[in-house]
Image: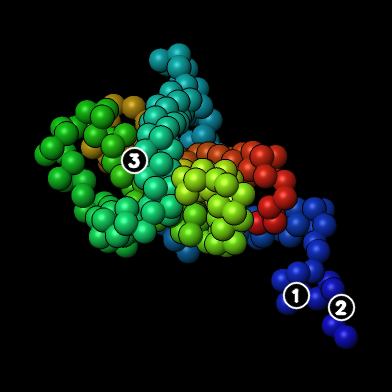
Amino acid sequence: MASESSTWNPYAPLSGRATRQLGLTAVAAVLILWSLISGLELVGPNKLPAPWQVAKAFAYLAWDGENGRSLLLNATMWSVGRVLAAGALVVAIGIPIGVLMGASPRVNAVLSPLVDPFRSAPVVALLPIMVMWFGIGEWMKILFLFVGAVVYLIPMVRDAMQAVPQAYWISARDLGATPWEAVRHAVLPLAMPRIADAVIVGVSVMWTYITVAEYVNAREGLGQLIQNARRFSAMDQVFAGIIVIVAFALLSYQLMRYIKSKMYPWETKL
C-alpha cells in the first residue's frame, strides 16, 4: 500500500514547514543560478543584471536623495490605485452579469456570444481602439484593466452558478420559494466560493496588464517606471520594477485567499 506522504499522491498532507522549506529552496536555487550566470558574465549586464545590481537599483528607487522622494513608493501607489479602481468596477459589473447568465439560460444565450469570444481574444489588441475612443488619460488605463479582467470574470461566475447541483434549486422550490428566491437563497450562496476564486483570478489578471496600461502616456506608475528605465537601458531598474509588480500580485493573491478562507471555511483549500 502506498504511503500517504508519497511524492505523487495529490491528497498527501504537507506540513506548513515543509512547504516553506521547499519554496525557499526553489527561490534560493534561482538566485544562486542567477548570480552564477551574471558573475561569470555568461549574459551581459545590459540583458541580465546581477542580483546585487538589482538590489542597488531598489535602494536608488526606494529613496532619491537629490529630489527627496521615493520613486518606487510613488509609482507603486499609482499602480495600486489603478488596480483597485478597476477591480471595484470588475466586481460591481462583472459579478451581477455572471450571476444573471448563470441563473437564466435565456440571458446566457443572449450574452454568451458577446462575452465568450473575448475570453480567448488578446485584450492587448484592443488597446489602440481604447486610445482612439477614450483618449490617453487615466480613464483609458482603468478601463483597459477592467476589460482585461472582466472578460475572464463573467464566464467564471456563470460557470460557478451552473456548477451548483440542481437538487438545491429544486429543494428550495419544494419549500415554497419563487424561482428567483431559489436562485438567490440556494444557488448563489453555494456558488460564492467559486465566485471568490473568479475574483482572485480577475485581480491577478489585472496585475499582468498593469505595465501595458501604463505604457501609454503615464506620468506615474510601475509600468511608466519600467518603460523609462528601458529607454535608458537601465535593466537593473527594469528588474526592480518587475519584482515589485510580482510581489504585489502575490501579496494581493494571498490576501484574497485568506479572506476567502475566512468567509467560506467549509470550502476545500486550494
Label 2, residues with CA under 10 Å away: few <14, some 14-19, many ≥20: few
**Above or below, comparing residue 43 to residue 101 in the picture:** below
Disc sitting over residue 81 in the figure = none
- Which x, y percent locates residue 229? 34, 38
- Which x, y percent locates residue 25? 71, 58
CB-based contact (under 8 Å), mark 1 and mark 3: no
- The CA distance from mark 3 to mark 2 is 47 Å
For the residue pair 232 and 189, the one nearer the viewer reads as 189
Residue 45 in view of the camera:
no
Q: Amino acid at mark 3?
A: Phe
**Above or below, comparing residue 41 to residue 262 in the picture:** below
Mark 2 = which residue?
A: 3
Displayed quadrant of residue 18: bottom right
Taking the image as shown, residue 20 lies to the left or right of residue 245, namely right
- Image quarter in which the C terminus is found: bottom right
SS at mark 1? loop
Displayed quadrant of residue 110: bottom left
Q: Amino acid at mark 1?
A: Asn
SS at mark 2? loop
- The CA distance from mark 2 to mark 1 is 9 Å
Identified at 26% across, 29% down, the residue is 139
Taking the image as shown, residue 144 lies to the left or right of residue 252, namely left
Label 1, residues with CA under 10 Å away: few <14, some 14-19, many ≥20: few
For the residue pair 149 and 193, the one nearer the viewer reads as 193
Displayed quadrant of residue 263: top right
CB-based contact (under 8 Å), mark 2 and mark 1: yes
Identified at 42% across, 27% down, the residue is 81
Q: Earlier in the sequence, mark 1 or mark 3?
A: 1
Identified at 75% across, 57% down, the residue is 19
Q: Amino acid at mark 2?
A: Ser
Mark 3 = which residue?
A: 146
Taking the image as shown, residue 30 lies to the left or right of residue 66, namely right
